[in-house]
Image: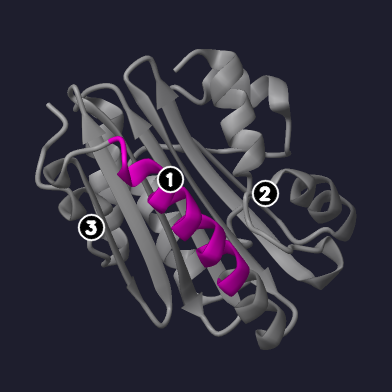
């Protein structure tokens, strides 16, 4: 994906719960990124993201002003920055694809559930709209009380999307798109293995090659 498109995707999907402050899931994400060799940013700087995201980056914040700025770009539906306690994000992108991991820890459980439910409904609509363009082996979905995921593959490329409740106040969204199975694709699957979740690539019978 070209840099401009990737930056837009990063901005729309910018956020992972604060790795320095919060839940056990955030510590798990931080370790996964470190093990993948990603660089922790010292501050939120879009120039640094554009220059260095091909090697992998992650960042976190619990500062109210920064959270407000970052929440303008999230893909989650119904999100309001005033309800967010912390934010954190990670990305890797190169010419063969990208994946963005972002998660938000809310100040209360009810707000987390509301945003989760609204986002799932939006994702379900996207899945239904995409389904007519793919054969049955090229697209798939799965859901449960605390997650929703879907993916599609065509011509050795594809996309995968998942939202899940990491804990009662933390919502995590992972967005990915690949043109072929290369280093970024391998990192994507390795990240899922590191956090102990089934990767959405398993939802589709066809494979990215």
Q: Residue furthest right?
A: 65
Residues in magenta? 117-133
Residue at x 39% of width, y 66% of height: 148
Q: Which badge, 1 or 2, comes first in the chain's sequence?
A: 2
Residue at x 55% of width, y 15% of height: 3
- Left or right, 84 with reference to 199: right
Q: Which mark is residue 41?
A: none
Q: Which mark is residue 193?
A: 3
* Residue 122 drawn in magenta: yes
Pointers 3 and 2 in contact (CB under 8 A)? no
Q: CA distance from mark 3 to mark 1?
A: 29 Å
Tell me the element at label 2.
Answer: loop
Q: Quadrant of the N terminus?
A: top left
Res 134 quadrant in image: top left
The residue tagged 2 is 74
Discs 3/2, front: 2
The residue tagged 1 is 129
Discs 1/2, front: 1
Tell me the element at label 3.
Answer: helix
- Left or right, 157 with reference to 95: left
Q: Is residue 63 visible?
A: yes
Residue 44's spot in the image, x, y percent?
A: 73, 37
Give neighbour class at mark 3: few <14, some 14-19, many 20+ (Cα, 10 Å).
few
């Amino acid at each position: 994906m070209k840099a401009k498109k990737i930056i837009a995707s990063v901005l729309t999907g910018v956020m992972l719960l604060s790795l320095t402050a919060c839940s056990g899931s955030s510590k798990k994400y931080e370790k996964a990124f470190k093990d993948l060799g990603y660089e922790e940013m010292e501050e939120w700087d879009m120039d640094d993201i554009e220059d260095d995201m091909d090697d992998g980056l992650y960042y976190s914040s619990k500062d109210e002003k920064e959270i407000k700025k970052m929440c303008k770009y999230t893909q989650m539906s119904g999100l309001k920055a005033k309800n967010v306690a912390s934010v954190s994000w990670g990305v890797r992108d190169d010419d063969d694809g990208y994946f963005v991991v972002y998660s938000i820890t809310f100040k209360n459980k009810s707000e987390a559930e509301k945003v989760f439910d609204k986002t799932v409904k939006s994702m379900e609509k996207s899945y239904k709209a995409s389904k007519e363009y793919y054969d049955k082996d090229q697209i798939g979905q799965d859901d449960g009380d605390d997650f929703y995921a879907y993916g599609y593959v065509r011509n050795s490329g594809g996309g995968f999307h998942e939202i899940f409740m990491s804990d009662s106040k933390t919502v995590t969204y992972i967005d990915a798109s690949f043109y072929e199975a290369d280093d970024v694709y391998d990192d994507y699957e390795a990240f899922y293995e590191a956090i102990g979740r089934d990767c959405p690539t398993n939802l589709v019978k066809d494979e990215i090659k």
